[in-house]
Structure formats: structure tokens, C-alpha cells
Image (tube, rainbow, N blue to C red):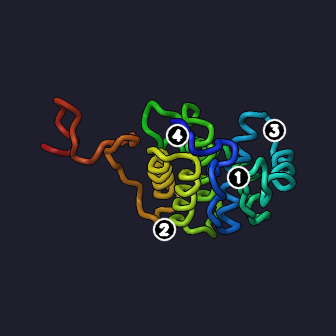
Amino acid sequence: MTGTPDTHPETGTETAGAPAKISPRSGARLAVVQALYEMDISGKGVLDALAEFEAFWIGQEVDGIAHPPAETAFFRDLLRGTVEEQRAIDPKLDQALAQGWPLRRIEIVLRAILRAGAYELMFRRDVPAAAAISEYVDVAHSFYTADEPGLVNAVLDRVAREVRPGEVGAPKASGKPGSSKPLPGKAAAGKPSAGKA
């Protein structure tokens, strides 16, 4: 899964023209994904990434690209929380991804989007699940023009159904690509389905 030539992977902003005006919380989500990407490729720690992004990226113009303002406290919580809770987040994402596609095989930016989105779903109950999923689908659209935003939607929906069943609904099998669970009543080729006599 790769980024398109229309965007800068480091920034998620379009190469031509200014990025659309977004809310400070949306700006924080975008900055978190950028910071997680930067931390992954450079080996920086959370404190260094926080300092760098707050001083040089958030609300700044870098190399002719305007980076949106961000709600600082929200940015800090999302970045710290995503990193601190990664041991809880990654298994949830592995369960939500298709069999044979563990999180470690997912491209760096997409992995950052999924981790930040899962953190919000699992640990930020003040943010409605549908809003969090929608926000990270929008972040994915900042980096990708192909199928990746749909993947973000599907994976985060599966996580939300598990961690917030009262808000989103019980986990469901989709039977579609990316799902590790078959549809109820569907049999594998040549095998009778379970529960049918």
C-alpha cells in the first residue's frame, strides 16, 4: 500500500495549493500521524517528536507547505497515548486486519493512522466512535487516493465494534477482503457450513 504522487508522505498535504482549512482537533490528528511516521523512520522518542512538531510544524509553513494549527493538549495526549498504549493497540489491529496481513506488514503511514485511530477508540471515550473513524478516514485521504481510506474505515470499524459494542454495535463478520472471519452460514468450498444439518 503506497502513497500517491500527489502528496508528501511526511506532511500529508497536497503538493499544489494550500491544504483545506481544518479544525484544531483534525489538525492534531494529522500532526500525530506525521509525528508517528517521523518517529518510525528516524527513531526519535516521544519528547523529541512533541518538541519538534510543536516548535516547527504545527501551524507553520515548511517548504511552501502550510501545516494546519492543532489543539496542543489533544495532540500531546494522542501522541503520548498512542505510543504508551501500543502494546494494547497492536493486537487489536492485528485481529481487525485480514489473516496474513499483520500490522507489521502495513506501510508506515497507514500503520500510524490505524494506531492513532485505535488509540482514540480504545482510550478516548469522550470522542464518539463514529467521529473518530470519520476523522481518520479523512486523514487517510490526505495521504492516499486509492483503497487505503476504505481499509482505515473497515479496520477501525471492527476495532470500534469490539471495544465500544454499546455505541457501535457488536462485532460482525463481513466476509469481504480484509476480514479474517467468514460470513455466518457460508461454507468453505466443498465443506458444509457449521450449524446446518
Q: For residue 167, which numbered disc appears in the image?
A: 2
User: With 158 as the anchor, is 68 left or right in this view?
Assistant: right
Q: Which residue is mark 1?
A: 32
Front-most of residues 172 and 72: 72
For marks 3 and 2, the one nearer the N-term is 3
Q: Which residue is mark 3?
A: 44
Give me the C-alpha separation between circle 3 and circle 1.
14 Å
Could you tell me which secondary element the residue under label 3 belongs to? Answer: loop
Give me the C-alpha separation between circle 2 and circle 4.
22 Å
Q: Which residue is mark 4?
A: 94
Could you tell me which secondary element the residue under label 4 belongs to? Answer: helix
Q: Say which amino acid is labelled 4.
A: Asp
Q: Are discs 4 and 3 less than 8 Å apart at CB?
A: no
Q: Say which amino acid is labelled 3.
A: Lys
Residue at coordinates 57% horizontally, 44% vertically from top-left? 6
Q: Are discs 3 and 2 less than 8 Å apart at CB?
A: no
Q: Nearer the viewer, mark 4 or mark 3?
A: 3
For marks 2 and 1, the one nearer the N-term is 1
Q: Say which amino acid is labelled 1.
A: Val
Residue at coordinates 12% horizontally, 43% vertically from top-left? 197
